[in-house]
Amino acid sequence: MTHKFGICLYMPDMPQNLGVIIRTAACLEFPLHIIKPLSFSMTDKRFKGAVMDYIDHCEIISHDDWSSFERHCTINKNRIILATTKTKNSFYDYKFKRSDVILFGKETAGVPKTIHEKVLEKITIPMNKKTRSLNLASSVSIIATQIISKL
């Protein structure tokens, strides 16, 4: 069941979400990229409670900053795709490739404007107009399972 696509979190700032996403990555067997810095410690009890022992079963690739992540993707020929509410490109219709890395912004702020402008490929989860967004961990799960079903 191993897949080559990856998920990347840009400077996550909610420990519980990171813990749940690590569990998801471990269970669905995709690598998880994390662009630092984190705004919390991995010893945070909220993180530890959510991640439990799943961290031992997850391939985590840490990047010190955006440039480090971008270099990694260039070297490994990974296409970066930004998951955002600021596009109309539904992830349901997107043609994913095995080497894609889906980038998710911070829970509280997304990605900086410079990154948003730099990443040309963008997808969204279509939602009703009465709501703003889904929880980050839910969004990662929804998109990851869609990619797995298409690859």
Image (cartoon, rainbow, N blue to C red):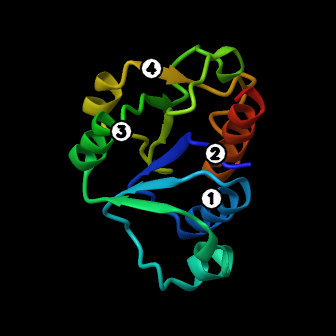
Side (left or right) of 91 relative to 10: right
Q: Which residue is mark 2?
A: 140
Q: Quadrant of the C terminus?
A: top right
Residue 37 appears anywhere in the view: yes
Among the 4 quarters of the image, the one containing residue 38? bottom left
Q: Which residue is mark 1?
A: 21
Specify the amino acid type for callout 1: Ile
The label shown at residue 81 is none
* Inter-mark Cα distance, 2 to 4: 17 Å
Specify the amino acid type for callout 3: Asn
Among the 4 quarters of the image, the one containing residue 35? bottom left
Q: Secondary structure at mark 1?
A: helix
> What residue is shown at x 49% (from left), y 22% (from top)?
122
Q: In the rendering, at what x and y percent does residue 51 appear?
A: 64, 74
Specify the amino acid type for callout 2: Val
Q: Which residue is mark 3?
A: 76
Residue closest to the eye, 59 or 134:
59
Q: Which residue is mark 4?
A: 121
* Inter-mark Cα distance, 3 to 4: 17 Å
Residue 52 higher or lower than 123, as above or below: below
Q: In the rendering, at what x and y percent does residue 76 appear?
A: 35, 38
Specify the amino acid type for callout 4: Glu
- Sequence-first tag of 1 and 3: 1
* Inter-mark Cα distance, 3 to 2: 22 Å
